[in-house]
Amino acid sequence: MNIKYKCEQVNGLIKPATALFLFSGQDSLDGRGELASFRGLAQPHLKSGAFKGGYLDVLPLFQGREGWLLLVGLGPADKLSEARLLEAAAEAAARLDALGLREATLVAPVLAFGMAKTVELMAIGLTLALDERPDYKSKGDPGPRGPRGLKGLTIQAPMSGDGLDRPKNVIARAKVLAQAQLRARNLTDRPANLLTPGLFAQEAVDLGQAHGLKVTVWDETKLADEGAGAILAVGGGSRNPPRMVILEYQGPQAQPSDRPTALVGKGITFDSGGLCLKPAENMHQMKTDMAGAATVLSTVCAAPALRLQGRLVAVIPLAENLPGGSSYRPGDIVATLSGQTVEVMNTDAEGRLILCDALALAQKFQPDRIIDLATLTGACLVALGEGCAGLFCDDQGLSQAI
């Protein structure tokens, strides 16, 4: 996907399609200087109520030889967030692609975020929307959709400034951030038979080395030597033994003595619940129990391209929680990497067990902070629903930054 930014006033439709972003409750384009040339085309649809501008509402309007005009809703102006702008750009890209177009122009709205952040968010959304996901279907089966036809998108606005004096850098940063998200998604989508702890560890080695990171892998022998009894217990029932992966990044001007930020990601490549077996109905979803690990791996691999300052240490515990003759049992007492012992009451509490070893290892790097990402409890989903994630933090500034 080729995405570029053009600093120039838009004077009417640009063939083959132009997308505009509008707020709800907006029955005219007054105050939207970047859209002045579209009053005659768009305003009648606003006044008639044909397009209300609700969040992710889309109205495609064919203008004959002039091409398509796509109206995209941002919802109420006072509720616009970075996430909503990103989603709106993604929705626009998906609709433009559905129209069978190969290229299109999107008029960047002038927002309080500033033009640099606006363009970055839009470019991330466009990249995410047009991702070609891995296809596991049989050859010859086209699946739910064919290949993407949209190949080129231009984000255009009549201003630069606030970091957009170098728009290529903004677009490049957006692509790094989007590709990191896509890598995490694609790893999480991968079936468990194709992403065992060993295969995940090898993926981490390959990616880490490709991005210039220091990568260390602890196999089952090293885990035993170091006293990481919790992760060994969780992975004991599987023929695919556990792994612990450590990736280290040192930013420009960072010193080895600088205290790092530690990232820890839960990597249960499949969670059956162990001897405390989960219900079969939704067990297939448990291939995603390594989403925290995928996110941490993708984050640290993006750090070099973003030239992040300081040091990062990523600790990724990987195990497969299966029932078997060597599985750990309810009532077992296991010794952990910190030297503490744990009595196991339920083998489906495997996440906190592998994380206690990983967190103890992360502490050995004397980090300034630890950020732990995990698909940890169904209770969190019951409490908060599917629209947000649980965040627990004892530092308000760090919490806001996350």
Image: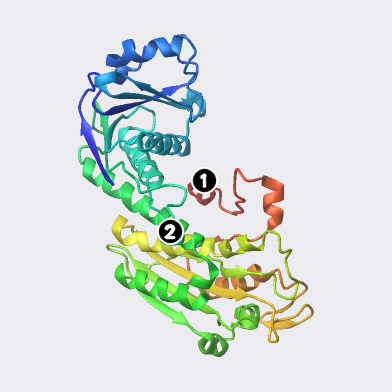
In this view, the residue in front, 160 or 272, is 272
Disc 2 or disc 1, which is closer to the eye?
Answer: 2
Front-most of 371 and 46? 46
Q: Quadrant of residue 113?
A: top left
Determine whether 168 is above or below 276 in the image: above
**In the depicted structure, whether residue 274 falls above or below residue 74:** below
- What is the x, y in percent for residue 89? 39, 36
Question: Where residue 153 sits in the image (x, y, percent)?
Answer: 27, 38
- Taking the spot 31% from the left edge, 43% from the top edge, the residue there is 149
Foreground residue, 366 or 344? Answer: 344
Q: Which residue is mark 1?
A: 400
Residue 28 at least partly seen:
no
For the residues labelled 2 and 1, the Cα–Cα distance comes to: 37 Å
* Label 2 residue SS: loop
- The residue under label 2 is which amino acid type? Asp
Q: Which mark is residue 135?
A: 2
Can the viewer see residue 374 in this picture? Answer: yes
Q: Earlier in the sequence, mark 2 or mark 1?
A: 2
For residue 358, side relative to residue 32 (left or right) = right
- Label 1 is placed on what type of residue? Gln
**Circle 1 SS class:** helix
Residue in view at x 67 percent, y 51 percent: 381
